[in-house]
Image (cartoon, rainbow, N blue to C red):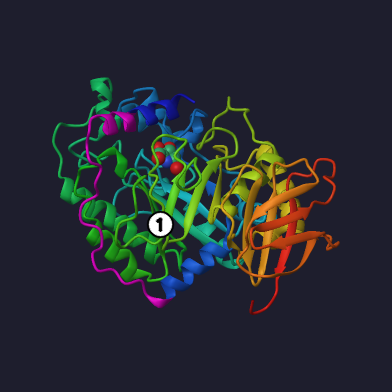
Amino acid sequence: MKKNKLFASALAAVLLGGFEISVAGAQTGYQPAPENLKAREEFQDAKFGMFIHWGVYSVLGDGEWVFHNRKLTVHEYERLPKFFDPEKFDAKAWVSLAKAAGMKYITITSRHHDGFAMFDSKVSDWNIVQRTAYGKDPMKMLADEAHRQEIKLFFYYSQLDWRNPDYFPRGATERDNGEWHNGRPDHGDWNSYLDDYMDGQLRELLTNYGPIGGIWFDGMWDKPNADWHLDKTYALIHQLQPAALIIPNHHQAPKPGEDVQTFERDLPGQNTAGFNTKDVSTQLPLESCNTLNESWGFNIGDGHYKSPEELERMLVQAAGNNSNLLLNIGPMPNGEIQEDFVMRLHAVGEWLSRYGDSIYGTRGGPLAPADWGVTTQKEGKVYVHVLNWKGKLLALPAVQKTIGNVQSFPDGSAVDFHQTGDGVVLTLPELKKDEVDRVVVLTLAKGK
Ligand code: FHN
């Protein structure tokens, strides 16, 4: 899509320009609190989350980068909130949909690059309560409902800001070869932007919404060489809610103070998108985010929906790469989630109701992902997810422990196998019609 090309080229410009991308001053000496370590484990167990991009940009049905892509001025963009009145927004329906899809957490844009707070902020009136006819705080409604339905809610927070004059000097997206001047003055107070505006809003998000899952940061890549005062911001978050996870989408190796490493439109380490790092943490939980169609924010012309089968495979691939999948939808400006998303999510939820045991609570399996598929593991079991193998016999590399028995999953029928020191040969169950993932579970003999 247009935005993605622009985004990729902005990043490529930074990379090709020979800059060493570095984020100065992360939270040095950070020791995660016990509740943070517990939250990391729970995060890994969760495996599947709902990503939601929703803001005043949704009104134009052209994605969340419309401010930038149409080269609008701040003055023009400021008219947009007047048209945002999501009278059909129903927090219960959104949370229930995530649960029906088998998703175990939700990450929503509390504000995107337009800087517009989708929550009741006292730091600035550039927020949903004060600038829209709607006048309510959907983040509060969602947080309350998420607590009621016992699902974790994370707030996406864009550090990049296309409206605030103090976001100065400007980053790569606005310089954009000098083609976009959105009318901001050529001066601003960067320190005040970070310490007063951004940290002020983060303090609100971490105090007014009950316990939250964490903060999902995005946008540092716009000014890769700036001092983002991460030391201060990360310490503030960990002090206000020690269990809250910091998940930065800066496309680099993790910095001290960060709790999860996330990858955009990519499996960990693969960098097919061209802007992710190939450095994969062996310490932190991993996450991979992707879109259900091709857009993040509501895009009225994007009908490129992934099928339930593709989504299920994406989730299996993520789990087999020891990662979560955070799957995005962009609700409509009236607050409804379009049926195209709803029915696909229900289908995935139905599949997970049968195959979930081979996904939830697992970690990446003992065998490296291969052309035929991936493995996951938990509690003395190895789940072999055969995604791409039509033959009857499948030869796997050696599994360190002795295998007690092998069963087809989830039906439990016995599967023939032959284990030697060199590997394991499985006689695979027949491929059923439309089966997306043939799962075979190896139960390891105790103590060997
Ligand atoms: O520019 C954003 C984009 O709009 C979207 O929010 C994605 C989600 O991972 N992150 C960006 C770029 O990395």
Picture quadrant of residue 4: top left
Secondary structure under the numbered disc 1 in the rendered image: loop
Q: Residue 28: say if magenta.
A: yes
Q: Which residue is mark 1?
A: 281
* Magenta-drawn stretch, dominant element (helix, strand or loop): loop
Toward the front, the furthest residue is 421
Using the image as rendered, state which of residue 446 and residue 30 is in the foreground.
446
Q: Is 261 placed above or below 371 here?
A: below
Q: Which residues are magenta?
A: 10-34
Q: Residue 12: say if magenta.
A: yes
Q: Is 205 placed above or below 126 here?
A: below
- The picture quadrant for ligand 1 comes to top left
Image point (34%, 55%), residue name: 254
Residue 154: give x, y in percent of width and height: 47, 57
Picture quadrant of residue 409: bottom right
Using the image as rendered, state which of residue 290 and residue 419 is in the foreground.
419
Q: Quadrant of the C terminus?
A: bottom right
Using the image as rendered, state which of residue 138 and residue 242 is in the foreground.
242
Image point (41%, 66%), residue name: 244
What's under tag 1, amino acid-wise? Answer: Ser
Q: How many marks?
A: 1
Mark 1 closeness class: few <14, some 14–19, many ≥20 residues within 10 Å = some
Residue 435 visible: yes
Drawn side of residue 308 relative to residue 141, left or right: right
Toward the top, the furthest residue is 179
Q: Is 223 placed above or below 156 here?
A: above
